[in-house]
């Protein structure tokens, strides 16, 4: 529901006709530079990664909606880097809720942050090493 709201409305709470004008796109544009060193600093990819917090399969569906039938934005090295990040970054909200219930809120926050940092580092390494060979 939160993701739907963020991608449907702009900051004036008007329904947007283009997703690039949504609140979600605005937030994603702010965090997009974090992913630039890994070859995918586009706001649409950041948007997909944000929706992936709800469920990992949302990343693929969001990318297909935002990119449509246009040519792929990513090269093979950037795509491999993105795949590594998607595999390693934070689990979905349901898994985080289970971690919180079993271990407590501090551990849940630690797990989310640690997995995001590890995912960023591995993704960056994939991009750097891939750049050496391709």
Image (cartoon, rainbow, N blue to C red):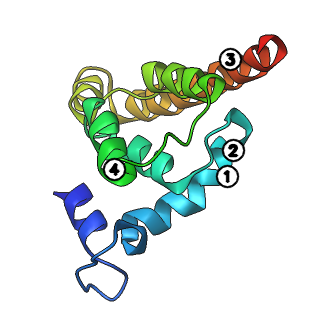
Mark 2 vs mark 4, CA separation in Å: 22 Å
Q: Position of residue 84 (x, y in %)?
A: 53, 19
Q: At numbered mark 3, what does the secondary structure look like: helix, strand or loop?
A: helix
Looking at the image, is 133 positioned above or below residue 74? above
The answer to whether marks 1 and 2 mark residues whose Cβ atoms lie closer than 8 Å is yes
The residue to which callout 2 is attached is 36
- Callout 2 touching callout 3 (CB < 8 Å): no
Residue 7, image x, y percentages = 29, 64
* Direction from residue 75 to residue 107 in the image, left or right: left
Q: CA distance from mark 2 to mark 3?
A: 14 Å
Q: Residues within 10 Å of mark 1 (few under 14, many from 20)?
A: some
Give the residue at x 37% y 43%.
Answer: 63
Contact flag, marks 4 and 1 (Cβ < 8 Å)? no
The vertical placement of 45 against 97, above or below, is below
What residue did someone put label 1 on?
33
Sequence order check: which comes first, mark 3 or mark 4? 4
Q: CA gap, disc 3 to disc 4? A: 27 Å
Residue at the spot x=43%, y=64% of the render?
25
Where is residue 38 shown, x and y percent of the image? 68, 33
Q: Which residue is mark 4?
A: 68
Q: CA distance from mark 1 to mark 2?
A: 5 Å
Q: Is residue 95 left or right of residue 105?
A: left
Marks 4 and 1, the one that precedes in the sequence? 1
Give left or right: position of 113 versus 47.
right
């Amino acid at each position: 529901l939160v993701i739907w709201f963020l991608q449907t409305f702009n900051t004036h709470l008007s329904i947007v006709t283009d997703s690039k004008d949504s609140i979600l796109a605005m937030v994603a544009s702010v965090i997009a530079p974090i992913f630039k060193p890994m070859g995918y600093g586009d706001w649409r990819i950041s948007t997909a990664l944000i929706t992936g917090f709800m469920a990992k399969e949302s990343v693929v569906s969001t990318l297909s909606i935002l990119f449509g039938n246009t040519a792929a934005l990513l090269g093979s090295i950037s795509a491999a880097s993105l795949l590594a990040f998607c595999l390693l970054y934070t689990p979905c909200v349901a898994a985080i809720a289970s971690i919180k219930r079993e271990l407590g809120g501090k551990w849940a926050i630690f797990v989310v942050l640690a997995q995001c940092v590890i995912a960023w580092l591995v993704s960056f390494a994939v991009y750097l090493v891939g750049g050496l060979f391709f």
